[in-house]
Image (cartoon, helix red, strand yellow):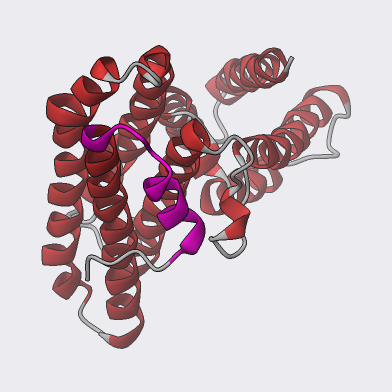
């Protein structure tokens, strides 16, 4: 269960001079790769079992392991980095990495997993919801592994060890294209009367939620769903156009942030 088979990761651990830091980075990698294995177990159970409730203990195991990673960073790894003469300067970088890591898992444990217990079975497809949880978790942990590795090997790339891996910049480019498409559809709704119907817009929004919502930052992810829910409540009423304009402004803001962050 707790072995690291990737040679480039092993080489990073071996190449760390500070013995305490070497040990703690090795433990962090073990915890991180264990998370990927838990994700894989969840995915296998989703495929094999008709009863999605069987995955609940695995989701709880995922949460415990993620908590262990964060606690290990706070209690041991951060201190060993501070004490390391060679890597002391990387403390702020590491804090940013773990802040981003925490935000991704908030998507799972503060929003997605809560929906699993909805009473209305028509509202959420539990199997798709679990697949979504695995997707978010995979991206978060792979990015953590890549960013930690870059501390010791700036040339390290996640694509070297993860199949179909997309960097943050690559995912940002994909997200930007999808948001521009939504932005354009809403523009057409207001500027080209009759060319886009509310049902057309909901089709595009549902497609985005299903395929690309997880790429948004946690704060934007929740706000996107709030705007979407407001639209659903006001469909075919005068308030629909008002809420759609607010949604349009929100998407404009996200697009600006993506451009600014890449600049």
Who's the residue at 58% across and 46% down the image?
Answer: 212
Q: Quadrant of residue 167?
A: top right
**Image spot of residue 33 (x, y percent):** 32, 58
Magenta segment includes 7: yes
Horizontally, is 85 left or right of 190 in the view? left
Above or below residue 135? Residue 176 is: above
**Image spot of residue 81 (x, y percent):** 29, 22
Instruction: Check the picture and name the quadrant holding the N terminus.
Output: bottom left
Instruction: Check the picture and name the quadrant holding the C terminus.
Output: top right
The front one of 126 and 243 is: 126
Above or below residue 66? Residue 62 is: below
Please state the extent of the stretch shown in magenta in the rendering: 6-20
Number of numbered callouts drawn: 0
Who's the residue at 71% across and 40% down the image?
Answer: 178
The front one of 87 and 219 is: 87
Who's the residue at 76% across and 32% down the image?
Answer: 180
Q: Quadrant of residue 83?
A: top left
**Image spot of residue 170 (x, y percent):** 69, 41
Horizontally, is 79 left or right of 180 in the view? left
Above or below residue 64? Residue 177 is: above
Horizontally, is 91 left or right of 205 in the view? left
**Image spot of residue 84 (x, y percent):** 30, 20
Residue that lies at the very extreme toward the right in this rendered image: 192
Magenta segment includes 64: no
């Amino acid at each position: 269960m707790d072995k690291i088979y990737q040679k480039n990761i092993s080489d990073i651990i071996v190449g760390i001079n500070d013995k305490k830091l070497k040990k703690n980075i090795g433990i962090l990698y073990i915890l991180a790769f264990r998370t990927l294995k838990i994700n894989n177990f969840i995915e296998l159970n989703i495929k094999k079992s008709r009863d999605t409730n069987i995955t609940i203990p695995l989701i709880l195991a995922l949460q415990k392991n993620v908590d262990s990673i964060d606690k290990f960073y706070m209690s041991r790894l951060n201190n060993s980095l501070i004490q390391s003469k060679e890597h002391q300067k990387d403390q702020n970088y590491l804090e940013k990495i773990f802040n981003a890591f925490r935000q991704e898992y908030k998507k799972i444990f503060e929003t997605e997993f809560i929906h699993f217990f909805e009473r209305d079975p028509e509202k959420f497809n539990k199997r798709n919801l679990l697949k979504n949880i695995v997707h978010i978790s995979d991206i978060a942990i792979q990015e953590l592994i890549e960013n930690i590795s870059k501390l010791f090997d700036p040339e390290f790339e996640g694509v070297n060890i993860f199949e179909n891996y997309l960097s943050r910049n690559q995912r940002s480019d994909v997200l930007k294209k999808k948001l521009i498409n939504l932005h354009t559809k809403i523009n057409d709704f207001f500027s080209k009367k009759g060319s886009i119907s509310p049902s057309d817009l909901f089709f595009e929004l549902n497609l985005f939620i299903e395929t690309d919502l997880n790429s948004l930052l946690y704060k934007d992810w929740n706000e996107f769903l709030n705007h979407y829910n407001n639209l659903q409540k006001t469909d075919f009423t005068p308030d629909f156009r008002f809420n759609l304009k607010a949604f349009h402004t929100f998407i404009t803001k996200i697009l600006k942030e993506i451009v600014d962050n890449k600049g």
